[in-house]
Amino acid sequence: MKDITTSDIRSRCDAVLEGVTTGTSRVPGVVAMITDRDADVYSGCAGDRRLGDDPMTEDTVFAIFSTTKAIAGTTALQCVEDGLLDLDAPAKDYAPAIGHLQVIEGFDADGSPRLRPPKCDVTTRQLMLHTGGFGYDFFNEVYKRLAEEHGQPSVVTASHASIETPLLFDPGTAWEYGSNIDWVGQVVEGIRGKRLGAVMRERVFDPLAMDEIAFTRTDAMKARTATIHARGEDGGLTPMDGFALPDNPEIDMGGHGLYATVPEYMKFIRMWLNDGNGPRGRVLRPETVEWAVRGALVPPQKIAMLPGVIPSLSNDAEFWPGLAKDWSYSFMVNTEEAPTGRPAGSIGWAGLANSYYWIDRANGIGGYWATQILPFADSVSFPGFIDFESAVYRAMASA
């Protein structure tokens, strides 16, 4: 790859961060970083942790929501490497509670859910690919109705009940983004015999020297945590001071539960750029990395637009409508070159409070963009991320 450490990457990226944190349409604050295979090559901070309060800094702690998923997926891949997990065996062999869940076919006249047994057992492979049958209430009308009329808890409660939901379809028959990776975390716990956070600490965080990342924050992390803000219909921002992912959760939610600083996540990105290797040891084998980053959906499984059925939590969301995309273990894969310059075969994903990352193994670079705003696919933060990524590839082209 071209040397971007001596290019105009800083001026280009700084301009993007300045642009999104000033003016009438802005984000409260942002931390954005770029890494190559060896080290961070750009780090930028702008705006505030809470609108009008402490400035955003590189060591700000974020609720990283669904960017947790790739880390939980990594712990499952390690179980495969150790011969402890058969991806095509029933997931109930490792997490028995999943075996009791049924498929919802609709609602009776009195509003009762109409349920039936699934035609086959859900597997961990299906869970990792989001073809297991689970959804989210902010992206799916059926789950939204279960929440509103039947008290189905939100996944942000980090409770067992929040993931013990009906399946939306028979496993393996469609793609639906949802709480599948939370169940992957339960599979890993069943195999390892310990909490998912402990498994991550032992097998991912310590080998990668990732310190300030956890399901439960230390007091020091709490003091540096950014506030999540709500974007109103008028475009204004309101701090959600009473809203946060729970510390000491009932279960460690592999789908969304981690808190972290951006520099810590960059170490995880570098592991994928370096074929599974970290500064304190190997996390994954190179051959595992090679197959884990490949798209694995089988028609009629297909990534679809995520409809924002709860407007306070998400807008309609899709990366590059019309661009071919796939899902791997467990990332989105763009199978065509993206308008930003991200090459085909790159991987990445996002978190509900408008955090986004990508990993470009071909060029040996990756980036993370962190804001704390609801709803998802924010009208300022998401385009800001796209501009940030585009700036990186323009800097590479001019180097």
Image (spheres, rainbow, N blue to C red):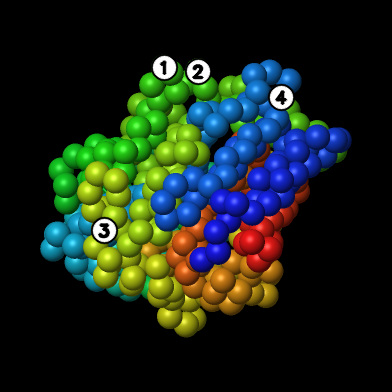
The answer to whether the residues at label 1 and label 2 have Cβ atoms under 8 Å apart is: yes
**Mark-to-mark CA distance, 4 and 2:** 16 Å
Q: Amino acid at mark 2?
A: Ala
Quarter holding residue 53: top right
Q: Secondary structure at mark 4?
A: loop
Q: CA distance from mark 1 to mark 3?
A: 32 Å
Q: Earlier in the sequence, mark 1 or mark 3?
A: 1
Give the residue drawn at x 47%, y 82%. Answer: 299
Q: Which mark is residue 223?
A: 2
Instruction: Give the residue type at disc 1.
Output: Asp
Residue 304, given in percent of the width and then of the height, sits at 59, 69
Q: Position of residue 46 (x, y in %)?
A: 68, 33
Please give the residue where the numbered disc 4 appears in the rendered image. Answer: 51
User: At label 4, which amino acid type do we have?
Assistant: Leu
Q: In whole angstroms, how far apart are the C-alphas of marks 4 and 3?
A: 40 Å
What residue is pinned by disc 1? 219
Q: Nearer the viewer, residue 71 or 256?
A: 71
> Label 3 belongs to which residue?
284
Q: Residue at x 48, y 76 (%)?
A: 301
Q: CA distance from mark 2 to mark 3?
A: 33 Å
Q: Position of residue 226 (x, y in %)?
A: 58, 27
Residue 222 appears left or right of 139: left
